[in-house]
Amino acid sequence: MPLYRDEAVVLRTHKLGEADRIITLLTRQHGRVRAVAKGVRRTTSRWGSRLEPFTHVDLQLAEGRSLDVITQAETLDPFHSRLGLDYDRYTAGTVMLETAERLVTEEKEPSVQQFLLLVGGLRAMAGGEHPAKQVLDSYLLRSLSVAGYAPSFDHCVQCGVEGPHRFFNPSAGGVLCVQDRLPGSATPAPETVLVLGALLVGDWPAVHAADPRHLREASSLVSAYLAWHLERGLRSLAYVER
């Protein structure tokens, strides 16, 4: 079987037979890949914790008919060892993994930007420099943008008139002016809209300076935007306090 190498983040695993696991990966060059890790559930397995969710790994894989087979795995960054010590960071991290899997829909289609964004997001989450909820919100907005669902927080998405605008509608793709307001649009505080823009571009000084109520309102709008564009909610998001 032809061999290839790639680096990847482990998104999830599930059991196969008595000793194997199917590992779902987001790879740098090959996009989403499902591969078998043979014997990984045995106590004598050479894999150890290298194929656990959150782990950033360097892999060698053999191409298979339906599933590839992992033949080598070396840990590049064991994010799970740090995220597992903090409930908020761990649960927010699981949302990031599920989001990445949902947004990269086609197997073996390269998605370098999504891969780099996930690695950077997990590194920020594990580093603890920024609050977990804000790292998650920033990641969600950026990953949606890379997937083609970039929100607008400074120009009306209908007519392009520069803001600030008071109305926000997930189905429209961002903020709306008074003339283009759609029924059911949210009316966030002006400060909340600024927070959303800061999260999207990674303006962390502005995020850190924001009032907690505006951060909470921003989180609720990010969740609504995510749910609309994914068409159904994320199971993991239920464990994150929004």
Image: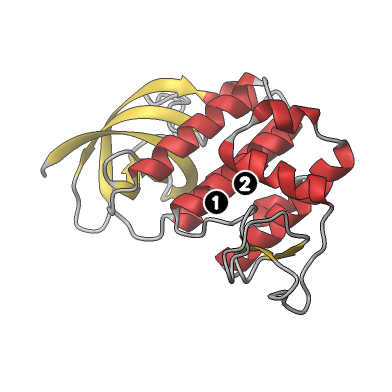
Residue 222 in the image, given as x and y percentages of width and height: 69, 53
Look at the numbered discs 1 and 2 and tell me whether their residues touch, using CB distance below 8 Å.
Answer: yes
- Quarter of image, res 71: top left
Q: Which quadrant, please, contains the N terminus?
A: top left
Callout 1: few (<14), some (14-19), or many (20+) C-alpha neighbours within 10 Å?
Answer: many
Mark 1 secondary-structure assignment: helix
Q: Which mark is residue 224?
A: none
The amino acid at mark 2 is Val
Question: With 23 as the anchor, is 66 left or right in this view?
Answer: left
User: Relative to 191, is 208 above or below?
Assistant: above
Question: With 218 as the anchor, is 115 left or right in this view?
Answer: left
Q: Which residue is mark 2?
A: 95
Residue 234 in the image, given as x and y percentages of width and height: 64, 58
The amino acid at mark 1 is Thr
Q: Which residue is mark 1?
A: 99
Residue at 47% across, 56% down? 103
Residue that lies at the very extreme toward the bottom in this rendered image: 183
Residue at 48% across, 45% down? 13
Mark 2 secondary-structure assignment: helix
- Quarter of image, res 201: top right
Residue at 75% across, 45% down? 240
Can residue 19 be seen? no
Residue at 63% across, 71% down? 171
Residue 94 in the image, given as x and y percentages of width and height: 61, 42
Callout 2: few (<14), some (14-19), or many (20+) C-alpha neighbours within 10 Å?
Answer: many
Along the viewing direction, whichever of 226 and 210 lies nearer the viewer: 210
Along the viewing direction, whichever of 138 and 2 lies nearer the viewer: 138
Residue that lies at the very extreme toward the front in this rendered image: 161
Residue 228 in the image, given as x and y percentages of width and height: 63, 67
